[in-house]
Amino acid sequence: MARGKMLIVADYCRADFVNYFTGIESEFDLYFFYYNYKEEIKKDIQLKFGHIEFYHSYTNAFEILKKINPIKVLFFDIETYNQIALLAACKEKNIKTYHVEHGFRDYDIAFSTEQRNEYTRIDAGVKQKRIPFLKKIKNRLFYSSTQSRSKYKNELLQFRKFRSVNSIFNSATYLGKLDLYPDEFISFSPQLFNYHKRAMGLTARTKCHYTGFMSSDAYCKPIEFVKNKNIIFIDTFNHITQLWGITNEFVTSYYQQIDAICKKYKYDLYVKKHPADNTNAIENSKVKIISQAEFEKDQSKFCIIAGDYSTLYLELLGLPYTLGISFNTFPDKSSDPLKFLLKYNVTCRVDELKDLDALLATGDKFYDNYESLRKIKKIMFQIFFIN
């Protein structure tokens, strides 16, 4: 009996995304789409199974569906022109589509025009050198060709107009207005999905599958909470995109200051870098860096989880044995991406580094709130555990 084919729109240079599908490669033929051309890939490919495809090999999204003939399509991101074109083609051909929500995001992010244009200019400059002119033209024609053949041509036209004056960061919010979004969603928990449902303008009838954890089975082992002096900070890659005024220089100084406060009260600070971070900003701070593999092996050493805005940070906060410290110390104070967590006191809050000093200075009292936080977290995240 022939295996069904699944098309997955996800960055296969990220091991945490690829790991979602480990174990089902024998059940499906997996086809991965993300980059337009091979030249766009800046990191090592983590995929050890399945097939890698590039958009430039096809004239439009309908050609992709005709060749691969998938039974379902999973989107990790629905933001770029080609991703939207593929979504529209799937809906027209009645192919089941899903959006895999892999993290927590502030869709109302205050991302200034100046910052966005600077980041876009730098990123585009790199791609300009890598991709020949004719290939870039062909890539633009992919969307136009799909639009001209689609019964959703008006929606695709409206999205093109929207994206021409908006950043990629709030593209998803517009899909609800167009009634152009996946058939079903896959999310960690009801609370998390409700946030995205409001932000994206989804209807109350939108179906969602709640998984508890998709990418974090390694963290689901029952672990006794142990009072120790280890703190792990789950870093983001905001200094690459320069969101909220965060730069490489800021990150280096930031961790130096945090490390100094931790040492003052005899805490050991470890930092786990984001998979997409290829800078030396954290290394320059001279803090201890721990790899993903090391963290998974020794996770029982890290019950105090610190962070500001990351997928893994959110997942780890949902575990009953963790105590979270959320840093809302961005240079740009116009945005509050942690408002969801902080509103419900799910974690200890640090608005300024002096708050961290005051928190660690309390000694054993630092743990007094642990029981109440744990109970709140279980209600908020509705985590399904592997016992």
Image (spheres, rainbow, N blue to C red):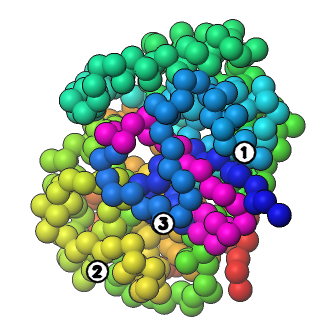
Residue at 44% over, 75% down:
304
Q: Residue 27 magenta-drawn?
A: yes
Q: Disc 1 marks which residue?
A: 70
Q: Quadrant of the C terminus?
A: bottom right
Quadrant assignment, res 259: bottom left
Instruction: Please say whether residue 328 is visible from this viewpoint.
Output: yes
**What type is the residue that disc 2 sits on?**
Tyr
**Labels 2 and 3: the sequence-earlier one:** 3
Left or right? Give the position of 69 relative to 251. right
Closest to the camera, between mark 2 and mark 1, is: 1
Q: Which residues are magenta?
A: 20-40
The kind of secondary structure element at disc 2 is loop
Label 3 near label 1: C-beta < 8 Å? Answer: no
**What type is the residue that disc 1 sits on?**
Pro
Instruction: Please say whether residue 119 is visible from this viewpoint.
Output: no
**Residue 229 picture location, percent across and down:** 34, 84
Q: Disc 2 marks which residue?
A: 267
**What type is the residue that disc 3 sits on?**
Lys
Q: Residue 113 magenta-drawn?
A: no
Q: Quadrant of the N terminus?
A: bottom right
Quadrant assignment, res 222: bottom right
**Marks 2 and 1, how far apart at CA:** 51 Å
Label 3 near label 2: C-beta < 8 Å? Answer: no
**Labels 1 and 3: the sequence-earlier one:** 3
Total residue callouts: 3
**Marks 2 and 3, how far apart at CA:** 39 Å
Foreground residue among 32 and 19: 32
Q: Disc 3 marks which residue?
A: 48
Which of the numbered marks, if any, corresponds to residue 156?
none
Left or right? Give the position of 327 relative to 219. left
